[in-house]
Image: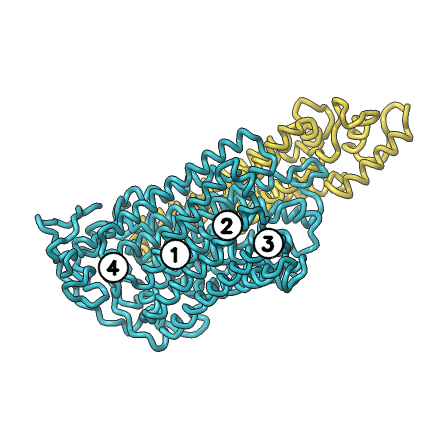
Chain colours: A cyan, B yellow
Amino acid sequence: MSIIVADEPRVGPVPPEPAPLKTNYLNARSGILSWLLTVDHKRIGILYLVSLTAFFVVGGLAAGLVRINLLSPTGAIMTEDQYNRMFTAHGVVMLFLFLIPSIPAVFGNFFVPMMIGAKDLAFPKLNLASWYVYMIGAGFMVWSVLAGGIDTGWTLYPPYSSRYSQSNVFPGAFGAFITGFSSIMTGLNIMVTVHKMRCPGMTWGRLPLFIWAMYATSFIQLLGTPVVAITLTLLCVERLAGIGIFDPAIGGDPVLYQHLFWFYSHPAVYIMIVPGMGVISETITCFSRKNIFGYKAVAWSSVGIAVVGFLVWAHHMFVAGISYYSAILFSFLTMLVAVPSAIKVFNWTATLYRGSITFQAPMLFTLAFLVLFTVGGVTGLFLATLGTDIHLHDTYFVVAHFHFVMVGGMVLAYLAALHYWWPKMTGRMYSDFWSRASATIIFVGFFFTFVPQFVLGYHGMPRRYPNYPAEFQVYNVLSTAGASILGFGYLLPGFYLTLSLFFGDKATANPWSATGLEWQTPSPPSTFNFDRTPVVVCGPYEYAIGVDQLGRGLPEPPGPGSADDPASHHGPTGPAGPMHKETHVVG
Amino acid sequence: MSANHHGEVLKHHFDNLEQQHAAERLGMWFFLVTEVLFFSGLFVAYTVYRNWYPAEFAFASSHLILWIAGVNTGLLITSSLTMTLAIRSAQLGDRRALIRHLLATFVLGAGFLGFKALEYYTDINERFVPGVMFRTELAKAEEELAASHGAAGHHGTAQHWAADLAKNNAGKSYTDPGYISPGRVQLFLCFYYIMTGIHGIHILVGLGCILWLVQQAAAGKIPRENYSTVEVVSLYWHLVDMIWLFLMPLLYLAGAGTHAAGH
């Protein structure tokens, strides 16, 4: 089935606004147990949202303390040992408890079934179990932090972590091991759901790009996470038994740990970023009122990243004494993995071209993502290049690169997703002004925080050092100042999103005039998502002709709605306007 | 019967049983992929070290208890057969045969664990455990060897492996050909305990699942339409068996033909 498009693209009939549901997934049942024992994918998404926010605050506070300590060349507030424990806490909490689960666990859980027209994920109980497993793992990590922290850095390299560290390595490593299973459960669930639960008409070529990205992410989770699980098991055994296979005293090789660790932990950065890329494909089309440029290229580049991402791990070990020839090979492969990411960025940019762009908060976060992720990606190439990496390895250049990709990229994509889908999840609109202000403040704060770190790293300031020469102080002070702006920017959504729950306007079913199936349900949706199984008739981004995936017309996008508003249907380039965008219906 | 059971078996979020079974099977296959990768980390590490230290691996391997491993292999392969027969019984809706075959599988799997426990018990009695036990036992063997220097044969109290190792290394320095590094022998033993231990945990989980199936079958909750529950558990059970088929030669036959010593 596909839409019959006449000579002129045309606007289909706009369906009437569905009446808000009396019983939706939020008020269908009440009481704390109805949340703790729920098998509804949407409620589990909310459980994850609440817990992830809590851990984001914890990891953010640790980062703030690290930055404050770096105000002075000799350490402003902490001893060296405390400093080690603080940056490790920041890394462990942010990576294992926030970034890895982030988008898959919150928005993947919530929206994958809705976007493919299913009633739930394939294994609802497994889904709930994944949250409990996550919380148990998090409990072990909290234990390790409360008992005094870990001083090894989040990478837990032996023999330091196994033999010599005086800190709480075991609960931390064991916690990471356990949260890994939660990640596997989520990934497995999403993969099976995408394979088996798509509604009629939802072919692979009509899947929203967010689904493609989630599928690619789940693939990495499934193949990578078990390897780090066994690696951490071996580390825990070595730590507890005092003897193990990475122990150099009996002929073991600590570099083998690094290989096994990075075999997962490098692909893990793609677990973190690829879902964000999926979100960007959703928001950038919606807020530029244009079909995605190069659907297949964007879809397959997600899969390309997932596959090639497994072949690059040893670029973390260029100075660990690996063979010169394998280093050359890994350098080459690392550059290769930049190609699919670049394909995405080019396609997004082309999507913006001649689009009718409006600047609501999700779009501001998206545009910030585009800039920051591109800077992060390009500086990654400096590190992929063997020669420059020798100079830049383990300096603040790496820290800045990683944060550009993970914070500038992933966290902004997470915020874009949160702002984009918030009306659907809660049924409320948040403050337009404050959300835009927050996006702007975060963008500016981010730049001030991490651009000085590129300079620091280039001039040779090593990461993880509490002390530095006095001439570096100005950059560190700049960075810390930027971090406080950034921190303030992060606080704002906490306020206006919370306030929106009580005082926000009621959201319509499709406030952004988006095409996906998730918007064709009332806000907030019912427990079973759709009152009847939807039938999909076209691709996911038919903005140019103004048609959703069910083949119905789109409501007027937010904005003045006058004829000179380019985003309007009747605007110059709108679907009903005189200069409507050229398109052909895909899928 | 089918219409009645249909409603109970089909979960609300699936359109039909076919979709539900396909999802369950696919989910289990994906899980098996993660299991393979979990063990593959161990296999990779094993391969690296065995390539580096072939003599030590051969020595240590030939001092493990081969007959127990052989019996256990037989038990597990047979249990795979009974498990498959259980699927057939479930498909036929033959509840008694289903329970019988599941119980047979359980007994065979439990037998495996029993023999495994016997093997661990013997190993620990022989002080064939990396770390302090290994070092003290070897030191004792070296002392006894020095004391009985010149005497033919050995009549000491040190365990077989320690005496062998002490005898092999007597008068050699670690750079000499034929020297067996005690450290690397312990490295092999780390692999031995970790690999068989993790495999044993998997068997234990499988036995738990089989018991659960027996209980479900006895309660009449596995009608013909729901045979895929048995199939999904069997997929897991077969994988655990298969991993043993890799572990067994890697651990017990690494020294085949190089040492006549051993049990």
Q: Position of residue A250 (x, y in %)?
A: 71, 37
Tell me which chain the residue with mark 4 is part of. A
- Between circles 1 and 4, the one closer to the viewer is 1
Residues beneath discs 4 and 3 located on the same chain: yes
State how far apart marks 3 and 2 are (Cα). 15 Å
Pick the residue in front: A308 or B142. A308
Position of A587 compared to B139: left or right? Answer: left
Residue type for callout 1: Ala
Q: Residue at x 30, y 48 (%)?
A: A349
Position of B250 compared to A409: left or right? Answer: right
Q: Which mark is residue A413?
A: 1
Residue behind mark 2: A454
State how far apart marks 1 and 4 are (Cα). 18 Å
State how far apart marks 4 and 3 are (Cα). 51 Å
Q: What secondary structure is found at the residue carrying circle 4?
A: loop
Q: Quadrant of the C terminus of chain A?
A: top left
Tell me which chain the residue with mark 1 is part of. A
Tell me which chain the residue with mark 2 is part of. A
Residue behind mark 3: A471
Residue type for callout 4: Ala
Instruction: Tell me which numbered mark, 4 or 2, is placed earlier along the sequence.
Output: 2
Residue behind mark 4: A514
The crowding category of the residue bearing disc 2, from other C-alpha atoms within 10 Å (few below 14, some 14 to 19, many at least 20), is many
The crowding category of the residue bearing disc 4, from other C-alpha atoms within 10 Å (few below 14, some 14 to 19, many at least 20), is many
Residues beneath discs 3 and 2 located on the same chain: yes
- Between circles 3 and 1, the one closer to the viewer is 3
